Image (cartoon, rainbow, N blue to C red):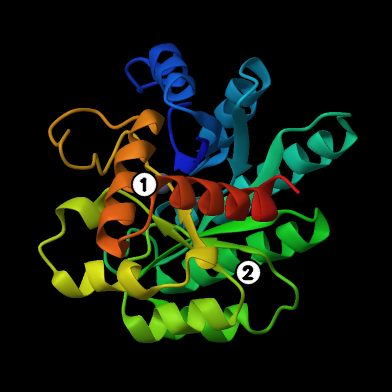
Amino acid sequence: MNFVDTHCHIQEPTYPDPEGAYQRALDVGVSAMLCVGTDFSSSQQAILFAAAHPAAWASVGIHPHEAKEGTKALDQLTKLLAVEKEKPKSKVVAIGECGLDYFYNHSSKIDQIAVLRSQIELAIRYDKALIFHIRDAFDDFWPIFDEYKDLRGAVHSFTDSQANLDKLIERGLYMGVNGIMTFTKHAWQQSLIKTAPLDRIILETDAPFLTPVPHRGTVNEPARVLQVANFLASIRDESLEDIAAITTHNARQIFFN
Ligand SMILES: [Zn+2]
């Protein structure tokens, strides 16, 4: 069996044991892990990590929390993508995580929206997928998303309403499912993944965060995508083989096509 962790941060210098985590992921059948940037320096680190590890890939972007650094970080990101474009084997497959976070509001809404738009435009210009981080902000997100055509990508760590899940599916986006679903106290969140079409689901860990049951209290790592897959299989009453095959196929469609 074969799994893809579509969202992790093991390239960060603060991550405790990236080499061990990488190896353990390979050992359980993770064939690809996508290292996601949240600012310019973590995006650079994602590129370096991916260059040194055959199964690692990079997404470069500015998290909505960092949107106040907007203009400077966007300039740096644009230059980075121009350099990547010239590489014969760039491992940058996506832009993100980018989006809107009105739960924390670490940056103003105006800055968040501007930086989101610029990143969508970069994804179009460089033909990359998008990894969205949207929290308590779908009402502002959909009208922006709908202004653009032919975007591909995922909403990572989706735990919002069924209505927003329906909108995501209508738009051809994918739902990133992680350890939250194994420990949430909200049955309605779990019901989202019971009925969502499997051909719209991708797996992720968000390592080092959101460690799934039964490993709560430890640092999360890409190998734990297996626990997410197992949980999904049991709640949907489907085989682990089907979950692995279809979510891996989905991830390849978006990122590695
Ligand atoms: Zn993340």
In the picture, residue 144 is in which quadrant?
A: bottom right
**Residue 17 or residue 224, whichever sits in front:** 224
The yes-or-no answer for disc 2 within 8 Å of ligand 1 is: no
Residue pointed to by mark 2: 117
Residue at horizontal 70%, vertical 69%?
151
Q: CA distance from mark 1 to mark 2?
A: 33 Å
**What is the three-letter code of the residue carrying label 2?**
Arg
SS for dot 1: helix
**Residue 141 or residue 69, whichever sits in front:** 141
User: In the figure, is residue 162 to the left or right of 74?
Assistant: left
Q: Specify the label residue 50 is tagged with.
A: none
Q: Are marks 1 and 2 in contact (CB under 8 Å)?
A: no
Residue 212 in picture, x, y percent from top left: 23, 42
In the picture, residue 190 is in which quadrant?
A: bottom left
**Residue 207 or residue 139, whichever sits in front:** 207
Residue 88 in picture, x, y percent from top left: 89, 29
Residue at horizontal 80%, vertical 53%?
126
SS for dot 2: helix
Residue 218 in picture, x, y percent from top left: 18, 28
Residue 165 in picture, x, y percent from top left: 42, 78
Q: How many marks?
A: 2
Residue pointed to by mark 1: 229
When the figure is inspected, residue 19 is found, relative to residue 94, above or below; the finding is above
Residue at horizontal 73%, vertical 53%?
128
**What is the three-letter code of the residue carrying label 1?**
Ala
Labels 1 and 2: the sequence-earlier one: 2
When the figure is inspected, residue 185 is found, relative to residue 44, above or below; the finding is below
In the picture, residue 208 is in which quadrant?
A: top left
User: In the figure, is residue 90 to the left or right of 103?
Assistant: right
Category of crowding for the residue at label 1, using alpha-carbon neighbours closer than 10 angstroms: few (below 14), some (14–19), many (at least 20): many
When the figure is inspected, residue 30 is found, relative to residue 20, above or below; the finding is below
